[in-house]
Image (cartoon, grey):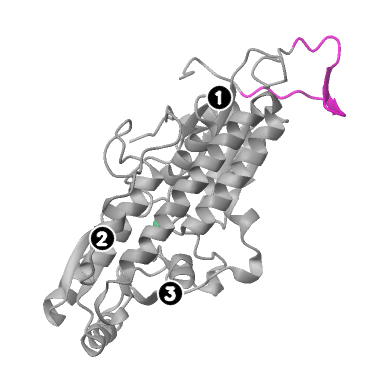
Amino acid sequence: MHTGSWQRVRLRGSAVAILGGLVVIQAGCGANAAGSGGSGSEARLQVVTTVSPITSIAANVIGDKADITGVVPEGTNSHTFEPPPSAAAVLSKADVVFINGLRLEDPTRELAEENKNDDAEIVELGTMVLPESQWIYDFSFPKEEGKPNPHLWTDPLYAIRYAGVIRDTMVGRDPANQATFQANYTAFQRKATALSEALKQDQATIPGSKRELLTYHDAYAYFAKDYGWRVIGAIQPENFEDPTPREVATLIDQVKREQVPTIFGSEVFPSKVLEQIGRETGARYEDTLRDDDLPGKPGEPEHSWLGLMRYDYRTMIRGLGGTSAALDALDTNDVAPDQAEYPQ
Ligand SMILES: [Zn+2]
């Protein structure tokens, strides 16, 4: 990527004006329009994304029609992530910045606002597809803190809508590639719908229809609502530390009472508390769910939003005693070559 010395350049006194789609650069400015993605220009559009599931959805829709760079490394806590100074340089070159929104990436958003080009846009996918009246607040994301549960991408219905916003944004920026963005979107929408159908088939095999989730990281609130699951608890408080002994005791009682066979931890957040709850209740502790860390390595087929969600649904359904034949049979290959940069 572009790592040369970079300086924030401010164009004072409104040297650049955009009038009816025409970029007018006043004499004496000397600025170079390359990289602004004007139609007919050779410059490739620069797309910046945040968490890896969003990077993957963007890569499916955009394919090789733009450079895509993620800024949130996989395996880090995206909820507390503070972008390093080097991210400012990446954001300064962006034409479009796709973030989840719903206040997940406030520090990255602020850095983008401070450093972006005047004609670059920040697109908050989640905030665009979910009206505020439907934001979910819960134990890990209490209303008093003002930050709703941001995990829309674990629900295929919303992932499809993210892809739709990405398509529309890209068509606006690069109308010459409209047919590609549309075809990729349609192919992605079909695959995400097939994932959704396989999920419905396999979740029906869970004995007693006990679609109950006790998770550490609270990443399935919207998914649960749309697919008829019940989140019986999440253990991670809003400060991303461990719950109090009293809260743990309450959860232990609940797991015993509801005879939950498996409790789910997250790969990114190892939890001694879940281990303890497992020991004291006899529930199996399955510690490999992942909400924004794709399986495999960049370039491998499973390293994708489709691979991520297939992995999680399969883990949840099998953990609760069901079978995953439909999910197993699913083709999770991306619809377009994924050349995005995923920081590790
Ligand atoms: Zn998360």
| Dot label at residue 324 | 2
- Residue at 36% across, 58% down: 198
Question: Marks 1 and 3, how far apart in space?
Answer: 38 Å
- Residue at 73% across, 13% down: 31
Magenta residues span: 8-30
SS category of the residue bearing label 2:
loop
On screen, residue 75 versus residue 97, left or right, reads: left
Residue type pointed to by label 2: Ser
- Residue at 51% across, 52% down: 159
- The reply to whether discs 2 and 1 touch (Cβ–Cβ < 8 Å) is no
SS category of the residue bearing label 1:
loop
Q: Residues within 10 Å of mark 1 (few under 14, many from 20)?
A: some
Q: Nearer the viewer, residue 176 or 264?
A: 176
Q: Which tag, 2 or 1, sits closer to the chain's start?
A: 1
Measured from the top left, where is residue 127 in percent x and y? 62, 56
Q: Quadrant of residue 43?
A: top right
Is 217 drawn above or below residue 41 in the view shown? below
Q: In which quarter of the image is the C terminus?
A: top left
SS category of the residue bearing label 3:
loop
Residue type pointed to by label 1: Lys
223 is within the stretch colored magenta: no
Q: Quadrant of residue 182?
A: top right
Measured from the top left, where is residue 21 in percent x and y? 83, 27
The answer to whether mark 3 is within 8 Å of ligand 1 is no
- Residue at 48% across, 31% down: 69
